[in-house]
Image (cartoon, rainbow, N blue to C red):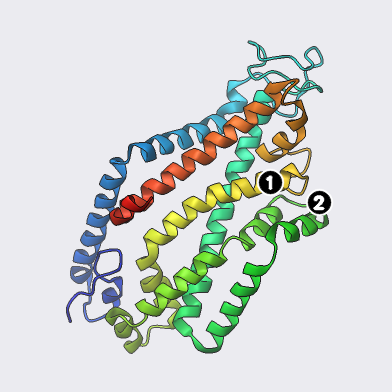
Amino acid sequence: MTDTLQPDGGPAPGLQSGTASGSGAQAPLEDAAASRLQLVWRRFLRQRLAIAGLVVVALLFGVAYLSPYLGRWQYDQLDFTAFLEPPSASHWFGTTQNGFDVFALTMRGLQKSLVIGLLGALMATALAATVGAFAGYFGGAVNTALVTLIDLLMVLPAFLIIAILSPSFRGHTWLIFVVLLAAFQWMVTARIVRGMTLSLREREFVHAARFMGVPGWRIIFRHILPNMASLLIIDATINVSSLILAEVGLSFFGFGVQPPDVSLGTLIGDYANAALTFPWEFYFPAAFLVILVLAINLVGDGLRDAFDPNAQGHH
């Protein structure tokens, strides 16, 4: 049997469980996968804006989590000697009307928004991959049920539903909010994954695995989804910025992260009215939000160009 090429350019991993046995047959496949990763990495390194975005994201992540050791104040500490104080040596980003340090609040909000974006993106991408692959591979009643679910969720007003459900979960963990965000973020990708699965299930390596009695779920997770790695990585990256913006929008209206915790969305919402009178309260969180989302999108564009150079001319 000849090697079948993956959509991503390497040999099909399904042959690992096909005609070849032992590490000798797996070695060429592993070498091909490693070579492809090296090629993608070299392409990514040529994307200067993407590298800049990656550096900015890493710096923001590091500063956010090192901030308790960098500044003098914690986000929940009050300075009763400094109310609405502009940026100074003691309060780098100034203080609020209650005496909270704006730098500490902004860094705490950045932490929360980053975690919400990352966790939500992982959940949404994993759900999209699983549902789309199962619908495309098994077909029949499974496909009908899952496609109906996808279509139903796509027409529902996600913002309104989350806004209605959020008050019911006040006082509970913020992870429930992340689950709600992810629950309305996966449908478009699931349809794409389903379409790719319909094509991949007819490939020789899938037929070989099925002929050997490999269960359908194992074929999906071991042979089909790895062929969509580039799509899923890019989708997860873009979902991070999308979910951060969704969190900001919901928190702005009071439906997201709840006090005493803070996020960039709650800070922007709480201090929007002070944008002209005490601008440091509003503009520091807003600036970090813009920089973060822009940097993540640059990384996503770079990954897309690295995995698919032909897409570069269609931006």
Q: Quadrant of residue 221?
A: bottom left
Q: Does residue 116 appear anywhere in the picture? A: no
Mark 2 residue crowding within 10 angstroms, few (<14) / some (14–19) / many (20+): some
Q: Residue at x 37, y 59 (%)?
A: 230
Q: Does residue 148 appear anywhere in the picture? A: yes
Please determine whether, in this image, residue 76 is positioned above or below residue 44: above
Residue 163: horizontal and vertical position, in percent? Answer: 76, 55
Q: Residue at x 56, y 63 (%)?
A: 186
Please determine whether, in this image, residue 249 is positioned above or below residue 204: above
Residue 51: horizontal and vertical position, in percent? Answer: 37, 38
**In the image, 315: left or right of 145?**
left
Which residue, given by chain and number where applicable, does mark 1 sit on?
Answer: 249
Q: Residue at x 22, y 73 (%)?
A: 22
Find the residue positioned furthest to the front. Answer: 314
Q: Quadrant of the N terminus?
A: bottom left
Which residue, given by chain and number where applicable, does mark 2 sit on?
Answer: 170
**In the image, 49: left or right of 251?**
left
Residues 118 and 253: in front is 253
Callout 2, which amino acid? Arg
Circle on res. 265: none
- Say whether disc 1 or disc 2 marks the residue closer to the N-terminus: 2
Callout 1, which amino acid? Gly
Q: Secondary structure at mark 1?
A: helix
Mark 1 or 2, which is nearer the eye?
Answer: 1
Please determine whether, in this image, residue 180 is positioned above or below residue 112: below
Q: Secondary structure at mark 2?
A: loop
